[in-house]
Amino acid sequence: MTKKAFVIGHPIAHSRSPLIHGNWLADLGIDGSYDAIDVPPAELVSFFDRLRQGEFVGGNVTIPHKQAVFALCDSVDPLAKTIGAVNTLTVTAGKIHGTNTDYLGFLGNLDAAGSGWDDDLQHAIVLGAGGAARAIAVALQSRGVTNIHILNRTLGTAQTFVADLGDPLKAHPIGDFPILAAKTNLVINTTSIGMHGTRFDTIDLGLLPKTALVTDIVYVPLQTPLLLDAAACGLRIVDGLGMLLHQAVPGFEAWFGVRPVVTAGLRAAIIATLEP
Ligand code: NAP
């Protein structure tokens, strides 16, 4: 029987997930499907009723449902609770389990494209304190990074974040970048700055050690102004598309029973959809 999976969101037409999973299904010759389904908030409960009927093996959840689905799942794993968002559902015998794979996507991307990035990593700077930053902080905690600095425009949001996630996180205003830069070997932009060519006015990447790696989770454009500036400073850079590709791996494996591989061909297929 054809195994069916989905991504739900509202709107959803922009999602690249059907292309990612569709490529893997075709390459691996699996009898399965993965479709984008537009589910407005008012229809989320009835969609979950449909899920319990067994039509789907699972799927992804995106904006605006990543928090609302907590109350509708039969179980949610502890990491998704810590992160505060569910992006992946699996359905087994009518029971719906929620998890979060964004932190694995972040790690998979840096492991693949930034070899040695976490070797003896003492100080990392996370720019932003939103949902994606929480997943990334959990990822950094899991790799034993000694100091994780959360720099945010709204300091209170960073302070709440740090109180929720605990050690070794510290909250800062963005203006603390120059104080922290010289000892920092990893900078991650998790804010929406970089979309539409926007840039940080106040961040001087030239203050970082030459061994530092800069990564951006914004992937439209693929080379954000932050990454271009980092490259101009001679720093290592990793773009954010890999995080999107790698976060899809655990979901696909759970639904279809095969662990897929993020290939250069898949990456090129998605990049072709990002270009104007
Ligand atoms: P979010 O929860 O809305 O958080 C947005 C963050 O950006 C907040 O910390 C906010 O600061 C900050 N911010 C927004 N505009 C700013 C500005 N003009 N100046 C300074 N800071 C600003 O969003 P999210 O879900 O974390 O997503 C953030 C970005 O990551 C989005 O562009 C999203 O598309 C991307 N993303 C990529 C992947 C991937 O797989 N590559 C995965 C998830 C998300 P305040 O607290 O001060 O408002």
Image (spheres, rainbow, N blue to C red):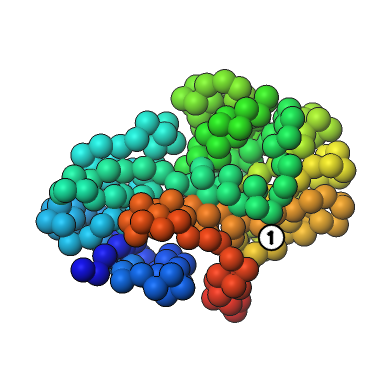
Q: Is residue 242 left or right of residue 8?
A: right
> Image quarter for residue 184?
top right
> Is there any visible trace of residue 10 in the rendered image?
no
Q: x, y percentage for residue 94?
A: 15, 49
> Image quarter for residue 259?
bottom left
> Is there any visible trace of residue 112 in the rendered image?
yes
Residue depicted at 72% across the width and 31% down the height: 121
Q: Quadrant of the N terminus?
A: bottom left
Q: Nearer the viewer, residue 69 or 11?
A: 69
Residue at the spot of label 1: 224
Q: Is residue 51 left or right of residue 19?
A: left
Residue depicted at 30% across the width and 37% down the height: 76
- Answer above or below: position of 179 versus 110: above
Q: x, y percentage for residue 143?
A: 61, 32
- Answer above or below: position of 272 versus 58: below
Q: x, y percentage for residue 17?
A: 43, 65
Q: Amino acid at mark 1?
A: Thr
- Answer above or below: position of 225 versus 171: below
Q: Nearer the viewer, residue 80 or 97?
A: 97
Residue depicted at 55% across the width and 37% down the height: 139
